[in-house]
Amino acid sequence: MITKPKGTIDIYGKNAKKWKYVEEVVDSVMEKYNYTYIRTPLFESTELFHRGVGETSDIVTKETYDFKDRGDRNLTLRPEGTAGVVRSFIENKMYGDTMPVKVYYNGTMYRYERPQSGRDRELTQFGMELIGSNDPISDAEVISLAVNIYKMLGLKDIVVEINSLGDKESRDNYRKALIDYFKPHIDELCDDCKARLEKNPLRILDCKKDADSDILKNAPKISDYLNEESKKRFDEVKDLLDILEVKYEVEESLVRGLDYYSHTVFEIKAGTSNLSIGGGGRYNDLVEELGGPSTPAIGFACGIGRLLLALDEEKVELPIKDDIDAFIMYVNDDEKKYATYLSNELRMSGFKVDTEYTGRSLKSQFKQADRLNSKFLIILNSEDLNNGEVNVKNNTTKKEEKVLLEYLIYYLDEHLVDSETDDEFDIEAFAKEQEEKKKKEEKEGKDEK
Ligand code: HAM
């Protein structure tokens, strides 16, 4: 048997329904905030990620899937979405459009990580980028949008950690202070940290291996190195988050694992599972570094697989639909032909309908209808069909009645509103009502002419 590659997942059955539900909520919230959908390639030039995500990030140094195509081009499966979006922003000259450009995406990313629950090599992220504003209102919007998606999904235990890495001057001063501080202790740190010391000492603070060491815990804090402007900016972001009633914690060791960040960085955790379900930050220099005009930007991304784990851990029941409106049952070939016709008619009229495909006995078809949680059973038999009617059974109340074929759609419409009650349906009164409606519509049509 051929099995799936290590670090990948199959999404099917109930989990797939949950997945689709999450995507629907993401689409609808993004729509409300006026973000438009963007789809960029799954693979890009390797150089994009080296220049974009950064030469000192673990993601680029250890985790990318790089390959050469048949034309000898160096390509990389995208490890994240921001670099591709920024490349597209520059290449398509979106900066000529009204700023800011607000886009969101949803797609697979690839990181050669050590797989474990919630950490995959093929992961799906949804995310958004707000390009073309340096105003703290955009930082607050992006963070609260993310929190609102989690809340809309029913997650309650959400921890938002924020920090500011300041502007270039603040970061340069902090960088120097970190090098001075870490240099005498460098032998006590891991090999990765040794390499990070000169290239990007901020990354040492993010080291998973040395996370518990006192050397890291006692390192200088960024807040002591933020210049006045950066401090003021961070204060404004916090004020706006207060207005939006987003609860946050300032986490001074938060530096994030990608090289492009400046000013605001944030990470969102699900408290119950302690899973990091999303993260992002401001990247004011990236557009220019990738060859575009100097343009400030901020964004966020969330791993959908990990989010679903967090929802499960918090025992959140997503309102996924796991039923069908009607199951059409038949036994002989003539009935099968009618079932084929009727299922098509009902589906095209907007009902969710299934039928029999494997020649089961009528008894087994009842079981199948139950397995599919069918609200109504439409039981065809040749005699009824000759009389122009079908037998319809409400699968909750078990009430059965004959319905004229010409009124079947109205009947289902009327009853599906509340199929769990046994309200009398006066089919004759209903038919009269329909006739009158039809006459009125015809008359109105004539009058209009
Ligand atoms: P990131 O923190 O690398 O940021 O990833 C964002 C989220 O993707 C994480 O919080 C986590 O939920 C999910 N994630 C990351 N790696 C994995 C994995 N191996 N398996 C499952 N889920 C994972 C970024 O990717 C930035 N591009 C975010 C951003 C957008 N910054 C600015 N704009």
Image (cartoon, grey):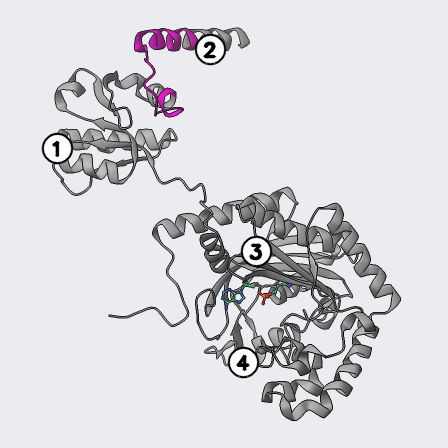
Disc 4 or 1, which lies upstream in sequence?
A: 4
- Which label is found at residue 105? 3
The stretch drawn in magenta includes residue 296 = no
Tell me the crowding category of disc 3: few under 14, some 14 to 19, or many 20 or more residues within 10 angstroms, Cα based: many
Could you say where residue 357 lies in the image, as x and y percent from the top left? Answer: 20, 41
Q: Is residue 170 visible?
A: yes
The Cα–Cα distance between marks 4 and 1, rounded to whole angstroms, is 62 Å
Which is in the foreground here, disc 3 or disc 1? 3
Q: Is residue 100 visible?
A: no
Front-most of residues 215 and 284: 215
Amino acid at circle 1 = Asp
Residue hosting label 1: 333
Could you say where residue 223 lies in the image, as x and y percent from the top left? Answer: 79, 69
Amino acid at circle 3 = Tyr
Disc 1 or 2, which lies upstream in sequence?
A: 1
Label 3 near ligand 1 (CB < 8 Å): no
Residue hosting label 2: 441
Whereabouts is ligand 1, in terms of quadrant?
A: bottom right
Residue hosting label 4: 62
Tell me the crowding category of disc 4: few under 14, some 14 to 19, or many 20 or more residues within 10 angstroms, Cα based: few
